[in-house]
Amino acid sequence: MSASTSLLRWATGICVATLLVMSGSAQSRTAVAQAVSGSDSKTLEAAMPAPGETVVRRSRSDQSQRYAVFLPDSYDVNEKWPVAFLMDPRRRAHVPLELFRDAANELGFALISSFGTVSDEPTAFEQTEAAFRAMLVDAQTMLSIDVSRMYLVGFSGTAHYALAVAPDLDGHVAGVVAVGGAMPPGSDQFLAAASMERSYAVASVAGRLDFNYDHAREMSRALDDTEINHRFFTFDGTHSWPPATTATEVLEWLQLIAVKQRLADADPTWVRQQLSVYRRRANSALATGDRVAAHESYTRIVDDLAGLPSVGDLKGAADTLRTLTRSRDVKRARKRERQTGERVVAYKLKMVEFVERYRERQIAHERGVKDLRLDQLRQQAADARDPEQAQAAQRMLASAYAHVAFYEPRSYVQRQDFVRAYGVLRLAREIRPLSGRACYWLAQSAAQVGTADDAIAGLKCALSSGGTSATEATADSLLESIRSDPRYRGLLPGQGELER
C-alpha cells in the first residue's frame, strides 16, 4: 500500500472519529467512506487547474464544500509536491491564497484554500472539520502531493483548529502556520505537539497590535524549551492575515526547515541565499547598535541554518550570539518584553472577569470605563515616547473592544437583552468608532431601549460599512420604533411608515 493511499484511509478515519466524538453519529463514517470509495482519480485530475493558475472547485468527496486551488508553474504530476491547506475564519478562500501564492509559486507549493472554514460560530469547529476533511481527501486523489509535507495554515479560530488537529496527523504535517492564534503552554494541544514522533514546525504570526499577540509570543517562548522548530513572525498590523511579504518569509522559513529535516531536497544556492539574507539583517542591526535586533537575527542563523552543509562553519555566528545573549541591553529588553506580555495577559483576564460581572448585573457606564481603565489606556496608547508600551496599551484596548463590540453584544442581541447590548456598545464607542455589524447591533438595541439618536446613527453606520443591507433593515421589526423618524426615511427612502 502506498503512503498516499494509507494516509487517505487513515486520515479520513481520524477526521470521522473526531466528528463522531462531537456529533455521536455513525452516519458520518458511512458518508465519508462512500465519498472516498466513489472517487475517480482520473476525473478529479482532469478538474485541476493548469500549473500557475488558480481555480475554484467543488469537492468531489463532499459536494457541500468548495475551495480554491493553486498549482505552481513547475508542477509536474510525475513528482510529489508539498501542499498548504489554507483556512480563513470568514470563508474567504481567496484572501490567504493571494497572500501566499507568489511564494508558493517560487518554492513549489500547492495551495488549497477553503470557502467553508469559519470561527466565532456555535458549530465553527464542526464546519471547519468538514471543510478540512474535504480538502485533505481530495488533495490525495486529485493531486500528486508529498504526504509527508502537509502544512496547515489558519488565522484566529482556524489557527486554533490547525494546532489542535496537527498532532493527529503525525508524520504527515510538516508545519503549522498559526496567525493571530496560539495554544496555551501546558495545554493538551501543547503536550501532544511536544510528544509527536516527528514534530512539525510552528510558525507563530501576529501583528504587533493584535490582541492575541502576547499569547502567540508566550507560546513561542514556551516552545524554546522543546525540540520543536519554531519561529515568531511579527508585522505592523492588527488582528489580521499578514502582508504578502511576511507570508513569503514564513513559507521560506518552512522550506528551510524542511531542508534541514531532510524532507525537501537541498538547493545549495538557495540555502546560501537565505544565509546571506540572515547575515545582512544581523550586520545591519549591529551597525546601528541595535543589539536586540542583532540577537534575534543571530538566533535565526544558529537555529535555522546550523547543520546544513552548504552554509559552512557558523561558529562565529554562535560566538556572537552568546556574547549578545549576555549583554545588558538584550537581558533588559527580554525581561521588559516578558513583563509587558504578562501585563497584557493579566488585563485580558480582568476583562473576562468584567464581562462575567456585567452578565450578572449591568454596570453603570462610568464605572465600566473606570474598571476597564479606558482613559488610562488611551493615554498610554497615544504616548509616542515609549512605542513598546504604547503598542501594549493598544493591544489591551483591542482586546476590550473585541469583547464589548463583538462577542458580548452579539450574545445579548441574540438573547434579546437589549439594555445590556446597548450598554456594552456604548463602552465600545469609548475605545473607537463602531463599524460593520456592531453598528447594526447598536441600531437594534438603541431602538429597543428608546434612544432614537443612537439608533439612527447606528443604522447609518451599518448601511455605509456593510453591517446590514436595506432589505434586512426594512424587514427588521426591532427597528419599528424609528421608522417614522424623518432621518430613517432619509437613509431608506420609500421604506418609512407611510409606505407600509
Image (spheres, rainbow, N blue to C red):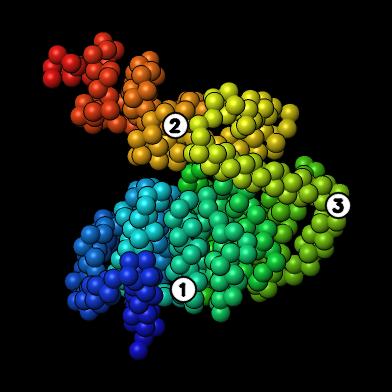
Q: Amino acid at mark 2?
A: Arg
The residue under label 2 is: 420
Q: Dot 2: within a 10 Å radius of its alpha carbon, few (fewer than 14), some, or many (20 or more) residues? A: many
Q: Residues within 10 Å of mark 1 (few under 14, many from 20)?
A: some
Helix, strand or loop at label 3? It is: loop
Q: Residue furthest top?
A: 486
Residue denoted by label 1: 168
> Where is residue 141 drawn, in percent x and y?
28, 74
Look at the image and tell me whether residue 362 can be seen: yes
Q: What residue type is disc 3 on?
A: Ser
Q: Nearer the viewer, residue 111 or 169?
A: 169
The N terminus lies in quadrant: bottom left
The residue shown at (73%, 49%) is: 338
Check the image and name the residue furthest to the left: 499
Decide: marks 3, 2 in contact (CB < 8 A)?
no
Q: Nearer the viewer, residue 340 or 333?
A: 340
Circle 1 or circle 3, nearest the eye: 1
Q: Which residue shows up at 18% across the image and 71% down it? A: 43
Foreground: disc 1 or disc 2: 2
Residue that appears at 42% across and 35% down: 409
Label 3 to label 2, Cα distance in Å?
Answer: 52 Å
Q: Residues within 10 Å of mark 3 (few under 14, many from 20)?
A: some
Which of the 4 image quarters holds residue 154? bottom left
Q: Secondary structure at mark 2?
A: helix
Q: Earlier in the sequence, mark 1 or mark 2?
A: 1
Q: Position of residue 12 (x, y in %)?
A: 34, 75
Residue 366 horizontal/vertical position (percent): 58, 23
